[in-house]
Image (cartoon, grey):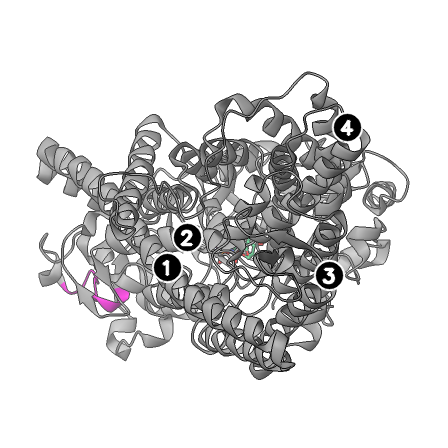
Amino acid sequence: MAQLRRKVSEALSMAEVPYETIEHDESDDKSASVLKPVEETSAETQADGTGSINNEDDVTQESECRTHCAPETVEVGNLNLLSSKFESLDYDTCENHLLLDEERSKGYKFIMKKSFARWIIFLLIGIFTALIACFIDIMIEVLSDLKYNCLQFYVDSCVWNYCLVTPYLLWMVLNIVPVVIGSLLVTYLEPVAAGSGIPQVKCYLNGVKIPRVVRIKTLLVKVFGVISSVVGGLAVGKEGPMIHSGAVVAAGISQGKSTTLKVDLRILDYFREDHEKRDFVSGGAAAGVAAAFGAPVGGVLFSLEEGTSFWNQGLTWRIFFASMVSTFTLNSVLSTYHGRPGDLSYCGLLNFGKFETIVYTFSEFFIFILMGMTGGLLGALFNHINYKLTVFRLRYIQARWLKVFEAAMVAALTCTVGFTMIYVMDDCKPLGQDPTKFPVQMFCGDGQYNVLGAIWFQTPEASVRSLFHDPPGSHKVLSVAVFFVGYFLLSCWTYGLSVSSGLFIPSLLTGAAWGRLVGMGLEILLPGWKVDPGKYALVGAAAQLGGVVRMTISLTVILIEATGSISFGLPLMITLIMAKWVGDFFNEGIYDIHIQLAGVPLLPWEPPPLSNNIYASGIMSHPVVTFNAVENVGRIIDVLRSETHNGFPIVDQQCEDADSMKTCGTYRGIILRSQLIVLLQNKIFNESVEIWNPKQVSIKMFWKAYPRYQSIKDVSVTQEERLFTIDLRPFMNPASYTLLHSASLPRVFRLFRGLGLRHLVIVNDSNEVIGIVTRKDVARFRVWKHRGRMGMIELMISEK
Ligand code: ATP
């Protein structure tokens, strides 16, 4: 055993060995296979690749710390912790007697009705998501026009009156006021609306319940928050939040009720289950992408790539339908708003402008590869700086007023950086070369405008467009270089602020700036070549975004659809692949870093490599808290009050010695805490015979309580009722998945990942319950990567 632990210790220390894993010997003592947590791992541990591991004496403490709990002093910002506060969603159907009764009584007609309702809901998801996108877009456009119009006037008039400090202060106020409003909304009303929401949606689709993520209040804060952030001039975009907004719309429409608004339409109650809701949410996320980028196929692929745990042909088709509807609705509404009804020329919120056919030659592939690699490097740098900043925030910026203050500070800094650039950089161009709405003259001659002023005095989307389409010679190398450095650092500081914000646009803009620099460099180096700097700006934008978020398939398709240039698909794909490979060499994508910092038990696509020698018996928890098929009400209440578990196997007889590895009876099924609470609240006791009437005891009882189940503290029973019994058999899931103790970790992992399981009961050869595995038990085994080396690390579970 000592030898085994030494091997484990060596494997997980991962100092020099390139590809290691945990050794496990089945014949060994069972307790040896359950590893003790890492004692103390600093925030630097993973990044430095020096993860420490259990020493020999600690294994005895395992029984006291059954859930691999973390040491008492947990360092904030530790990437090697899983938080126990995140519960799982149950994507497995509970095929109990109530469901069968429901199916039998309603028949085939009901299936048709349900299928029809699904299509209608996906249609509504597409329409409402697009309408929200239109609202955000129009509000931002109107408010930004007012802001930059006013600023342009003051800048131009003050240059000659020596009062430039007035427009500077005005700019600062016009930045700070909206940003503070947005930040107050997010910080005090709904913190889960901060950021783009993509990591949260990704976790939801993966099967992790993120509290309040799909509530209507979150949607409202998100919408007004993102308008405030963009109008406030922060280095953010409105596209990422659209994905979250789509997800909330989907979750709301599909349930036919809103607990926040206390409205229950009493329709669609048959969709009140986690797996049904998940399918709609993936449609909503796709509709959000479609509305944001005018990319319906990209939307479908985004939902596929970024996490949905279940996929079938019917679902793909419906999601595609929602995405198409979303793009079409947005297009129709925005075209009408811009005075061209029926023209349908506004495909998405992000408009890259019309690219004429982009031509490229074989020799340019080499440049695209190099640019992809540069994007990977810059993306990794961005993620690393942002990771350090996030850890700093977690440690020192905890008070809510401090979060708002930080947002205000960044808003002030953004305008200071912009103003300094416009003031200092002497880059003038004749009017008419740039489609900018608010050309500022500053110190330029008559009939000229300041190039940096044109970039800063518009929304970031418009700036991306300018960098893609401005004719060659529109910018000086120095001004674009200074803009790139300034914007890179600003966007890095901005992501993670307590405001609603998207990361796509700032990354695209930074990348477009350095991509254009590459184009300008090539113009100088190869005077004979007809270089189109806009093309390189596009490749740079793709490389930078790919290097930060590390998406490949969906991002390629989104960019192809947004530019409308299918022939340029291959260079974009090559760039994105290179950016991902190079970036992955150093660290994870930005969303994954934030997910890890939050300690979310997210399951990746694949199980950890070389883990076939870890067995279910080594990862399961035991002894298991179980219930009898006919259970005493008092015991159910006591167990629910004393234990925190959410799933309990049902067995024929209770085990006698709960402290040992003895079996706990023959497996019969599994029941959830939420189901037990509903049963207790409705007093479905064997002794109260009159309630056994199909109208009262039906699956609708559970649908009604979904998704905000009461806590056990809210259940009250009399002393007499405590002596009653409940027959759990009609309510338990009799066909839940079970596995033999000898199953390997990859097999357990695939069941969880593929089927979206919440609990997996482990049985012995006689079908007796000997253990239970949950998502957290599986998520603890994570692939560790650092500078090209790879291994597996076992995470701790923290109570925080
Ligand atoms: P979730 O939080 O994912 O909804 P849960 O609350 O039932 O599920 P976890 O919080 O993941 O379970 O469980 C924490 C630990 O408790 C895990 O190691 C798990 O194996 C263990 N566990 C879960 N259910 C039981 C049970 N009925 N008896 C004993 N241990 C359990």
Q: How far apart in space, not on screen, are marks 1 and 2 (Cα)? A: 9 Å
In this rendering, the answer to whether 198 lies above or below 533 is below
The kind of secondary structure element at disc 4 is loop
Q: Compared to 474, does 677 lie above or below?
A: below
Whole-number angstrom distance, CA of label 2 to CA of label 3: 35 Å
Checking the image for residue 136, the label placed there is: 1
Is 541 or 67 nearer to us in this picture? 541
Find disc 4 in the rendering and name its residue.
Answer: 527
Q: In front: 154, or 108? A: 154
Picture layout, residue 677 above or below residue 335: below
Marks 3 and 4, the one that precedes in the sequence? 3
Residues packed near mark 3 inside 10 Å, few (<14), some (14 to 19) or many (20 plus): some
Q: Which mark is residue 425?
A: 3
Q: Position of residue 726 (x, y in %)?
A: 26, 59
Q: What amino acid type is highlighted by mark number 1?
A: Ile
- For label 1, the crowd category at 10 Å Cα-Cα, with few meaning under 14, some 14 to 19 and many 20 or more, is many
| Identity of the residue furthest to the top in this view | 362
Examine the structure image and report whether residue 564 is included in the region drawn in magenta. Answer: no
Residue on which the image places disc 2: 242
**Dot 1 or dot 2, earlier in sequence:** 1
The three-letter amino acid code for the residue at tag 3 is Met
Which residue is painted at 28% across and 56% down in the image? Answer: 252
Question: Residue 325: horizontal and vertical position, in percent?
Answer: 27, 39
